[in-house]
Amino acid sequence: MTSENPVFERHQTVYKTDTKFQLDTLSYQTQYVDIYFLRLAKLKRIVEAHGRERWDAVEVNGDYVKRVDRVLDVRQGELCWITGTIYMNMPLKPNVLDDIAKDHFISAPLPRQKYRDFEKDQIMIEDESGRLELVGSKIKTEDLVTGCVVGVMGTETASGEFEVIDIVLPELPDQNPRPIPKAPSSQRNYVALLSGLNITGNIHESIETHLLVEYLLGEAGSPEDQAKTSSISRLIIAGNSLSEPHAQATDDAAAAASSSRPTKSKKYGYDAASYNAKPTAVLDALLTDLCTSISVTLMPGETDPANASLPQQKMHPTMFPTAKYYTGSTFIPSTNPHACEIDGVRFLGTSGQTIDDVFKYVDGDDRLEMMEKTLRWRLVAPTAPDTLWCYPFQDDDQFVIETCPHVYFIGNQSEFGTRLTHGLNNQEVRLITIPKFSETGELVLVDLETLDCEIISFKSKSGVSA
């Protein structure tokens, strides 16, 4: 007797892409200051509503705390609260003079891991009227970055500084309810999250990448593994699919000595003839294989061939001569940041640049805590345009989070991490840091019904439950 292999059918989901981060025109002809005015106008009323709820009934020495409309209207000795945009004056932050130094071939300072210096940093609040320096133990223990909108309560000191007693944030925005979980069954519904493939195109490409493709196609593992794979309805690749090019300057004299042919001069020491198209071809083949069976959303990252400024737009379809024929069905090139709904569950995520930049402003290295902060600031990229490149928006600040996601992910982190965070109105968000696959060999699975996470590791024989 011969037993037939079981046949599995991949679970299907309803996918809706949010076009929030897609730009019709890409122009740098306007000033960046408009972003801060738009951001303040959008978030000020929200912060003020929290401020009224928290401070309107507060009484000190017979006087009630009063709201002040503008920063410059604060009076010395008067207990009040104001709303504005935070500006961090940090001497260790990069500035345009460093770029000019590079242009003049002066040795530029090495990049820093952190910009924070508690001895020299100044924290300021500003609006359309002016700036006011914030002092006090309360503000020093609050991790803030340039660009976040807050409300602060306190009083102006004799030296003209504002001593902060309390602070309010915009907090999490309203959240659409998740679909009601179905009755427990053996058929789960997963979305896979992946980042940092860093494909080099070398003939000895990582074996983990091949195992990953075979696993997602249901060609590897036992029937139980294949049954689980069929429950993975979609794959989101969160940036850095291609490795960073390593074009090195060559010594013309040494090259000329080792060859009888004349050596052509190279602009900035880079030989255009050494361009290697192999990584893109390998990625195209990998996507083509996956798209025959599973829907793939591809986000650009810092090392991918896309625009450097946020929001990064979709990678051009001509890069994928084979996979592009699946566009509109199972191949979905997307932006970075990316927002979508899968079976009513809202996803929001970036390829990592946003949190990597916030990391430089704050004390500590808890990436999940930083993610939670950005949600409470309602800003997916709070440090843009201060130290993170972005487009100079004129009509709307695209980085303001208007609808609270159910799943918030950040790609290309050093390790996997996850936890639930909650808002004031019973919002519940699953925070996920996705590790670099090229370093960890890990794939993250998210259960759409419970929002529980699970790790599938291709460097070991078993997955580890999160």
Image (cartoon, helix red, strand yellow):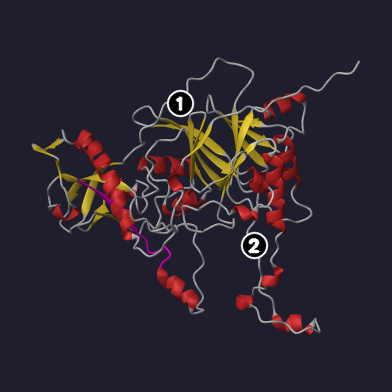
State the residue at coordinates (66%, 70%). Answer: 248
Q: Circle 2 is placed at which residue position?
A: 245
In the image, the segment drawn in magenta is 82-95
Q: Please, what is the three-letter code of the amino acid marked with disc 2?
A: Pro
Depth-wise, is mark 2 or mark 1 nearer the camera? 1
State the residue at coordinates (72%, 58%). Answer: 278
State the residue at coordinates (67%, 73%). Answer: 271
State how many labels appear.
Answer: 2
Magenta run includes residue 129: no
Q: Please, what is the three-letter code of the amino acid marked with disc 1?
A: Arg
The secondary structure type at the circle numbered 1 is loop
Q: Position of residue 284 (x, y in %)?
A: 69, 50
Magenta run includes residue 92: yes
Q: Position of residue 402 (x, y in %)?
A: 37, 40
213 to the left or right of 332: right
203 to the left or right of 305: right
Asked if 136 appears above or below 112 in the picture, the reply is above
Rounded to the nearest angstrom, the CA distance separating label 2 from label 1 is: 42 Å
Residue 466 can be seen in this image: no
